Amino acid sequence: MDRIAGRFARVEPRRRIRRLVLGLLSDLPRKNCWTIAEWAGDATPDGMQHLLNRAKWDADIVRDDLRDYVVEHLHEDQAVLVVDETGDVKKGTDTVGVQRQYTGTAGRIENSQVAVYLVYAGQRGHAAVDRELYIPRSWTDQPDRCQAAGLDPDTAFATKPELAARMVARFLDAGHHARWVAGDEVYGGNPKLRAALEERGTGYVLAVACNHEFTTQAGKFRADTLAKKLPKHAWQQLSAGAGAKGQRFYDWAHIDLPDPTPGHRHLLIRSNRTTGELAYYRCYSPHPVPLTTLVRVAGSRWRVEERFQSGKGLAGLDEHQVRRYRSWSRWVTLAMLAHAFLAVVRADEHTRHPAPDNLIPLTCNEIARLFTTLIAQHVHDATHRLRWSHWRRRHQARSQASHYHRQATAPA
C-alpha cells in the first residue's frame, strides 16, 4: 500500500483504499462495496462507492505500479506473458460492455462482460499485470450508450487480439522484458498480433485451430493434415510443467516452417497420451530454441486459468457490482493488486523458508487464510451488525417500492 499511497492526494482515500484491499483479501463469502464496508467498520457503503466512482485517482497509474511490483518480485529471464480473457455473467443491459456472448466461465452464450488480461508467469509465481475491457460493437455503434457508461463517446471497436497487442506493447514500452507470449486460439489465429510480436522480436507460442493453414515447402496444409504425415519417431514425451497431480506429460512434435523473413517458425503439436486428442500451436522465436522450450511456453498458458480461479476466489475479481467503466477499472485493478500481494508473499516464502518434506509449500489460498486470521480479522459488536441490517432492509425497501412504481406506471 505504501507503493501506491502517493497516487492519492488526500489521506481519506489512502486509508479507505487500504481497507478495501484488505476486504478483498478477507474471507467474506461475497465481496462488494456493501459487504466490505460493513466488514471494515463503515456505517454505510457510501465511502467505498465514492472511492470507486467519484474520488480523484487514476486506476491506470496504479496498474503501472502493480506491474512494476509484480516484475520486481517475480522477475525471471524466462518469464512468459500470457494473454487470455475471462467473462463475468451479468444481468441487465446497462453494465459497461455487457451483451449476450460466449463466456468460458459459464461454458455457453450468456449475458456477460468479458475482459482480456495480461499475466506475468514464471517459475516463482504468476500474477496479472494489465487488463482491458472488451467493448463489443453493440456498444461502440451507440455513442450515447458508451457515454452513459463512462466511456468516451468516440470509443472505437477493438478485437481481443488488438487489446492483447496493446497490453504487451505497454509492458515492453515500460522497460520490462519478456521473451515469450502465449495465448489460445483467439490470439493464435490473428496475423496482426503475430506480426506485431515479431516486429518487436518477441517470441510466441499461440494455439491455433485444427483447420489453421501452414505454408510448407510442399504447399499449404491444414494443421491436422500435417500432423497425420508425421512418423512415429517424430514424437517425444515431455512434461509441460507441474500440475496439481504431478508432471503433465504429453507427446510432442514440431515441424519447421520455411519463411524468408528473419526468425524461426514452427508448428508445434501436442498429443494427449490417454485420449489421443491433438492441439496445435503456431510458434516464432528470433533465435533457434529447443523443443523443450516451446513445450515450456505452451504449458505456461494453463497458469492463467489458475490465476483466474484464485483471482476470483481469493480477491473478488468478478464480484464487483458496478456499471460504469471507471468503477470497473478501479475494482479490477485493486483485485489484481490483492492477488499479486498473495503471489509475491508465496514466492518469497518459498525462497526464504522452504517447506519441510512432510508439508507442501505454502499456497496462495493458505496464505490468504493465515493473513485473514492473524492480521486482517475485523470483529464488530452486535450494534454495528444490527445497524447494517437496518440499513440494508431500508435500502431494499426503497428499491422494491421504486420497481413497483415503475411497473405500475409503465404503458401497457
Image: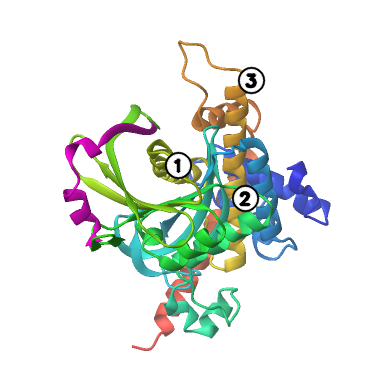
Dots 3 and 1: beta carbons under 8 Å?
no
Residue at the image point whose x is 58% and y is 67% from the top? 325
| Residue 329, magenta (yes or no) | no
**Residue 289, labelled with which disc?**
1
Between 32 and 172, the one lying in front of the other is: 172
> Which residue: 65% across, 60% down?
52
Q: Position of residue 362 (x, y in %)?
A: 52, 24
> Which of labels 3 and 1 is toward the front?
1
For the residues labelled 1 and 2, say whether their Cβ atoms are less than 8 Å apart: no
Quarter of the picture holding the N terminus: top right
The quadrant where residue 55 appears: bottom right
Mark pair 1, 2: CA separation: 37 Å
Q: Nearer the viewer, residue 111 or 116?
A: 116
Picture quadrant where residue 201 is located: bottom right
Instruction: Say what amino acid the circle numbered 1 marks.
Output: Val
Local secondary structure at mark 3:
helix
Q: Secondary structure at mark 1?
A: loop
Q: Which residue is mark 2?
A: 334
Q: CA distance from mark 3 to mark 1?
A: 32 Å
Range drawn in magenta? 221-241
Q: Nearer the viewer, mark 2 or mark 3?
A: 3
The image shows residue 388 at horizontal and vertical percentages of 59, 49
Instruction: Say which residue appears at 54% left-offset and 39% top-offset.
Output: 78
Task: Give the numbered dot on residue 3.
Answer: none
196 up-or-down from 227: above or below:
below
Q: Residue at x 33, y 88 (%)?
A: 412
Q: Name the front one of labels 1 and 2.
A: 1
Please give the residue where the numbered disc 3 appears in the rendered image. 352
Q: Can you say whether 33 is above or below 192 in the image?
A: above
Q: Amino acid at mark 2?
A: Leu
